[in-house]
Image (spheres, coloured by chain):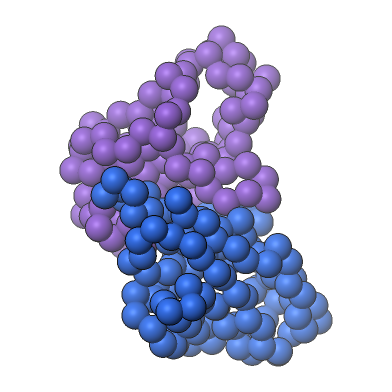
Chain colours: A purple, B blue
Amino acid sequence: DTEVTQTPKHLVMGMTNKKSLKCEQHMGHRAMYWYKQKAKKPPELMFVYSYEKLSINESVPSRFSPECPNSSLLNLHLHALQPEDSALYLCASSQARDSTYEQYFGPGTRLTVT
Amino acid sequence: GQSLEQPSEVTAVEGAIVQINCTYQTSGFYGLSWYQQHDGGAPTFLSYNALDGLEETGRFSSFLSRSDSYGYLLLQELQMKDSASYFCAVRDHKDSSYKLIFGSGTRLLVRP
């Protein structure tokens, strides 16, 4: 099983809402990533978790809050977002941090902030 | 810092061969990865080259020259479904980081 799943597929939220994005993998991977991708741009790294601990935070605004409840799950909690946060949010995993060159991506959550 | 350069767009005919180049500037280098992303889809890992030379996987091959800081992705017997964006990527060497740095992407259009 080389699948990373993400829910929901689409999300529309107002600037005062609180919502969460979910990601799951069952490949036994110990590194998990959140990316933000705007149209016609490469993925932009937000967070890296390694063995359920936050390894990298790319100076992401505090309105984005990651959580890794266990080795298979990764959440991204959203609060008080801005319209410019509208993007495709991708989750990925790799066997370990050292295997970051080979990442498996989920289908993404298309987020629209109104 | 790290930077990667690849052409923004490439057009080719179905059945043909196309090469997508990537040049990189890095303070340290582990290897070069390639990813494919269809419109509306997720990036998919294609290949990784840590050593010089050509790696072949079916219709796709990837090449690396560490001395030239250059690599390419070669797609043979092009099919319409190969129309997608292709990203080269390197691992960030800064502060023992495990961040993958992506190029800006090459949009491949395959014409009938």
Q: Which residue is drawn at 21% across and 35% down?
A: A53
Query: Is residue B35 placed above or below A77 in the rendered structure?
Result: below
In the rendered image, residue B84, in percent from the top left (x then y), is placed at 65, 65
Question: From the viewer's perspective, is B112 left or right of A19?
Answer: right
Q: Residue at x 45, y 28 (%)?
A: A60
State whether residue A37 appears in this view: yes
Question: From the viewer's perspective, is B18 left or right of A55?
Answer: right
Q: Which residue is drawn at 37% across and 37% down?
A: A47
Quadrant of the image for the C terminus of chain B?
bottom right
Nearest the viewer among A106 and B34 is B34
Nearest the viewer among B83 and B48 is B48
In the rendered image, residue B91, in percent from the top left (x then y), is placed at 38, 58
- Count of numbered labels shown in the rendering: 0
Indicate the quadrant where residue A14 lies: top right
Question: From the viewer's perspective, is A82 left or right of B50?
Answer: right
Q: Residue furthest right?
A: B112
In the rendered image, residue A98, in percent from the top left (x then y), is placed at 25, 58
In the rendered image, residue B74, in percent from the top left (x then y), is placed at 57, 83
Query: Is residue A81 placed above or below B52 in the rendered structure?
Result: above
Indicate the quadrant where residue A56 lies: top left
State whether residue B35 appears in this view: no
Query: Is residue B53 placed above or below B25 in the rendered structure?
Result: below
Q: Residue at x 51, y 65 (%)?
A: B24
